[in-house]
Image (cartoon, grey):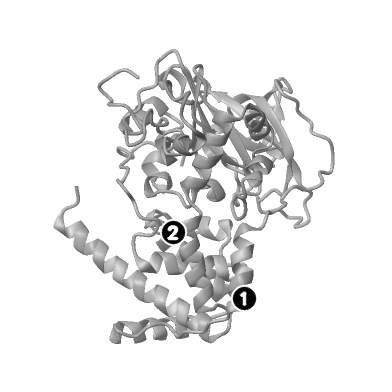
Amino acid sequence: MSGDHDVDHHAEAESYAALRARALESLLVEKGLATTDAIDEIVRTYEQDIGPLNGAKVVARAWVDPDYKRRLLDDGTAAIAELGFGGAEGAEIVVLESTPQVHNVVVCTLCSCYPWPVLGLPPSWYKDAAYRSRVVREPRAVLGEFGLTVDESKEIRVWDSTASLRYMVLPERPHGTADLPEEELVELVTRDSMIGVGLARSKPGVASTPDPKKPN
Amino acid sequence: MGGVPGYGRVEPELDEPVFHSEWEGRVFGLVIAVKDGLSRPRLESLGPDEYLSGYYERWMLAFERGLLARGAVSANELDAKTEHFRINPAARPTRRVDPELTERVRRDMYRQRDIRRTPARAPVFGVGDRVRARRIRHGGHTRSPGYAQGRRGEIHAVYAAYDLPDYQRDAAAPAQHLYSVRFEGTELWGASAEAGTAVHIDLWEGYLEPLGSGVAEGTDA
């Protein structure tokens, strides 16, 4: 993918960034505007505690509990808070139900708005120009690059989260999972399925998106 | 950048870490920890080359400019400190801990935000109404994406009222209702649109005008 030149260039740029970040942290700590352990805690929280497992629990609950699902689609923020999730970048979370008729997929074409409390921080591709510029224009082609072919008869609805709300997809529950308990269903819910660039797994450990060469 | 041509394939990274380098996490932590750390207009005021550099590079640059603008740090001391770390690769940032503050920061990450505002008036549009996204000409920050401006859509949902982030002559501009507006792929992209696709965009009331008003290009939002 990248030639040696790109790698060198990247390493060089990153080392400047690393030095600059160190300088900023040091100065702000010296001036009493930041503290070391608070930064440690923020990094730890988003690396370990606030991530897509939260959203997976929300989805699994909605799959097994029709009343919860109703509350979730009616007021996502409140229903998500029932499971203990909420906070920064999650003041207003709207949950979009994907169905046999409609496949939902989320983007932020203006920046990279993302529902942190349920999905954590966004992956690089979500923040990159390729996804942001193209998914509104050719969603079928872009989903194909994730290995997801959506049947022509199914509408694709792209949600551009340009404003105050954050969107999360409630993916379809895979066939053949009627007997699985909620804890095992959680393992089927991938981050990508909650952005809408993938589907939930049909079995634990199975790839989240089907082989692009085979029909869904 | 919605609809802007010229970008290649999406390249998902397998098992991507939350932060690719330690410094990314430190910058993220600083921005979250330092109040008023980053504002979207400042992020968007970066030049095109700056904007397309890495995500956390952008955060850091915008954060740095904000600190300089409000005099929290000076350019000279920041450059001198950067040079200090370049000459002394083993040196680490000055440490100071405050467990009580950290607990407050931790709680703040989980604090429920209330961003709904009291609107100046009831929503003008209802579900199913046909609207057109106005062309925005004030030249400042706007959250109305360019690819939909001038295009016709339909109100899909009426949301609550929220502060409008556009630069306003009147800083106390009242909050406006927000709508989910549905635009068919063919309306946005013409014949090149993929079949059976639509884009739903969140737009403030001032970004919209009723269709059939006879005004194709309205006043600024």
Crowding at mark 1 (Cα within 10 Å: few <14, some 14-19, many 20+): some
Secondary structure at numbered mark 1 = helix
Q: How crowded is mark 2: few (under 14 residues within 10 Å), some or many (20 or more)?
A: some
Q: Which residue lies furthest to the left in this view?
A: A4
Q: Residue A27 at what x, y percent from top left?
A: 49, 83
Q: Residue type at mark 1: give it.
A: Leu
Q: Which mark is residue B26?
A: none
- Disc 1/disc 2 C-alpha distance (Å): 20 Å
Q: Which residue lies furthest to the right in this view?
A: B121
How far across and how far down the image is residue A73, in percent? 64, 31
The residue at which mark 1 appears reads as B101
Indicate the quadrant containing the C terminus of chain B: top left, top right, bottom left or bottom right. top right
Q: Nearer the viewer, residue A70 or B77?
A: A70
Compare residues B76 and A187 and report the one nearer the observer. A187
Q: Mark 2 lies on which chain?
A: A
Query: Which residue of the protein is positioned furthest toward the top in this rendering?
Result: A153
Secondary structure beneath dot 2 equals helix
Compared to residue A122, the image places residue B125 above or below, namely above
Identity, as a three-letter code, of the amino acid under mark 2:
Glu
Same-subunit check for callouts 1 and 2? no
**Is residue B62 among the parts visible in the rendering?**
no
Whether residue B19 sits left or right of residue B181 in the image: it is left
In front here: A38 or B50? A38
Say above or below: B220 vs A213: below
Query: Which residue does the image show at 55% across and 32% down from the upper left?
Result: B148
Locate residue A79: give its quadrant: top right
Residue B38 in view (yes/no): yes
Residue A121: x and y, percent? 47, 52
Q: Mark 2 points at which residue?
A: A47
Q: Which residue is at 50% across, 67% downward?
A: B29
| Residue depicted at 52% across the width and 82% down the height | A29
Question: To which chain does the residue with label 1 belong?
Answer: B
